[in-house]
Amino acid sequence: ATFFQHALNSGIRRYHVAPVLCQRAKVAMSHFEPNEYVNYEKLEKNINIVRKRLDRPLTLSEKIVYGHLDDPEKQEIERGKTYLRLRPDRVAMQDATAQMAMLQFISSGLPKVAVPSTIHCDHLIEAQSGGEKDLRRAKDINQEVYNFLATAGAKYGVGFWKPGSGIIHQIILENYSYPGVMLIGTDSHTPNGGGLGGICIGVGGADAVDVMAGIPWELKCPKVIGVKLTGKLSGWSSPKDVILKVAGILTVKGGTGAIIEYHGPGVDSISCTGMATICNMGAEIGATTSIFPYNARMKKYLGKTGRADIAALADEFQQHLVPDSGCQYDQVIEINLSELKPHINGPFTPDLAHPVSDIGAVAEKEGWPVDIRVGLIGSCTNSSYEDMGRSAAVAKQALAHGLKCKSKFTITPGSEQIRATIERDGYAQILREVGGLVLANACGPCIGQWDRKDIKKGEKNTIVTSYNRNFTGRNDANPETHAFVTSPEIVTALSIAGTLKFNPETDYLTGADGKKFKLEAPDADELPKLEFDPGQDTYQYPPKDGSGQHVDVSPTSQRLQLLEPFDKWDGKDLEDMLILIKVKGKCTTDHISAAGPWLKFRGHLDNISNNLLIGAINIENGKANSVRNALTQEFGPVPDTARYYKKMGVKWAVIGDENYGEGSSREHAALEPRHLGGRVIITKSFARIHETNLKKQGLLPLTFADPADYNKIHPVDKLSIVGLADFAPGKPLKCIIKHPNGSQETILLNHTFNESQIEWFQAGSALNRMKELQQKSS
């Protein structure tokens, strides 16, 4: 029997393999939802309406975004200015953010999701001793949360991917992304799906609730940055080097408010999963998302993952799945892939780019440790079959010369399908033999789920990973860990050498026989020669009728907590707010709401609020998690101080620096300050997702009209935001700064609220506003 006959006739994952019987036949969006269809006709109709209105060639990003407009005939469209009302095709949620998203959906009172939606269990599995043991331990520790997500999924019509199934973005690429889809996901690396030609955008849980509730989703009309690729990748250069180079050019906020659109003759030299790697890490430059045009590499991947019918349909509609000739980009970057050298970025920020050939010398000059303690490959960014094959090709050469890794070495498969296939094809065994430990199909150390034992906290050390982020303490909660991100094959080579001073393009290793040898550039198949082995069946279909399903949340649970509505705006100005903290320098969502051990509280707002801003540096004393209580004058932890202010009925504000809230899409970084009595966050600039999340929870994210005014505010001052009765789009708000000596200053603060977002603020949150509208219509 063929693989597909076997799959259809057995209990393993079932693939939808119906042939296209005639042109423009109905084709399922995924083999798990045979009655939900790819709707290219609607996409085509909307694109034609908008093209006629704008009377100009369209970029690919514009085609797919505008092709999903709620009202293409009347929608105002101006890149970087207007807010678009969109109708995404589907929603995906990872388990850490799905808890809060599903709790919000439950409180909306709706019976079932309006669009295909899925939950993916990947964030709560801690890397400790190896895949099987870690998975068993995670299922035991997180049983209450997994049961909640499984039963909530069954009740409200959401597909449930069990723990061990893999990382959300790899599952989406294998099953749900396709050319022209618009998908939103409650994880910042959702853009991974752009490797299959989709517009896949990371959002907070409240945005996901809007789409699941059938409400048009709002997005500020993105600008489009074109990245023209010429030449061809070869040798040690990999798709990861493209995005590492782009990150070095654009920096962590250079893509904010824009979609990165790759195009040009170099595109065809990159595999589909390689394109996904590039799109995935676009999150690190603040991009709304990233995308590649539909091509033969995508068609090949669709065919290999049981979706030849979607590829055939995409062929028919290809003109809408590539950019128009002559389309205009807001900015263009050109990269010659033939000249691109292997890169390694870090430490402490993903946009500090270095050629691998330079990193040893730079590290020695800067005083960064050159000895590599651990090399880690995998993650949602780099865990494809091709990635594992190229790493195994490097490892195989070392083994042939009697060498193993000098550094510790871990491997994270991206999905159960990847794990099963690399086991079958021998890659996993090669990586074990060179010294590797295969971890569970999950996020693991990439998000701080790592029970690291080889160093003490505070010990200065270096790790190299094929991950996406390397902010301070992100992987192991040690602020002295210098983390560098690069391609899996470079991680493997550096782990064998054990030092940053090794350049595999030019340097030699010494084999067990004492002879010197040079590693050859790795070569590996982008897809398996045989079909993928799907491995264990880890998917739970939602029942046709889930109305009788019970969802249990214990009132004494320490992991889950039903949500209470936030208070409405009282119609008054915000007078005499205290400053909880004035943040110095970088403040990511990891600083605002740490992950790692805190992930277990993602479904319990009060408990997770005990990590509010504990990683942020207080400008007053240069310390983390130490702020002055303005009412007692004593220094204490940030969350305790916020709770004290809330108890005393005192409103408070946070003052931040540039790109505040960059990083993860976690909306807990917005829910926590609101829950503990915060009202206003004032910064020089915001990261896109975090700014929206703050608005959704009824907070005021405001920016200095003059960035220099950041220096006028001191932690001991009191702030008043006046003019809220006339709060309107495009109209700055006034802030009165009251200094302890009695003097006052008035500054202007800008905002990006539109009319409906102002209604969120007035109602107390977007969810409160949704309920108000439901009550009016019923």
Image (spheres, grey):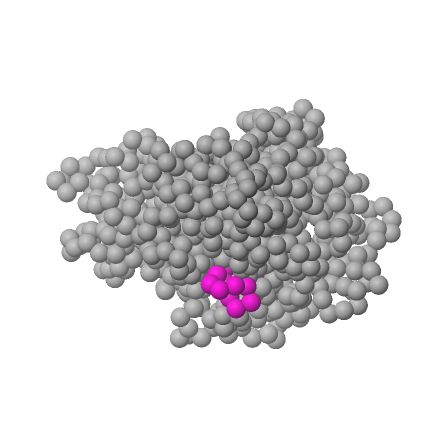
On the question of residue 299 being in view, the answer is: yes
In magenta stretch: residue 592: no
Q: Is residue 211 above or below residue 560?
A: above
At which x and y percent is residue 467?
51, 47
Residue plotted at (75% across, 35% down): 319
- Which is nearer the eye, 231 or 250? 231
Magenta stretch, residue numbers: 120-134
Q: Is residue 63 above or below residue 408?
A: above
At which x and y percent is residue 88?
62, 48
Name the quadrant containing residue 728. Answer: top left
Residue plotted at (24% across, 44% down): 622
In the figure, is residue 396 to the left or right of 582?
right
At which x and y percent is residue 425?
69, 56
Residue farthest right in this picture: 22
Q: Is residue 643 above or below residue 338?
A: below
On-image quarter of the C terminus: bottom right
Q: Is residue 53 above or below residue 42?
A: above
Query: How many numbered marks are there?
Result: 0
On the question of residue 696 being in view, the answer is: no
- Which is nearer the eye, 507 or 56? 507
In the figure, is residue 651 to the left or right of 557?
left
In magenta stretch: residue 131: yes
Residue farthest top in this picture: 326
On-image quarter of the N terminus: bottom right
Q: Main secondary structure of the magenta part?
A: loop
At which x and y percent is residue 33?
71, 59
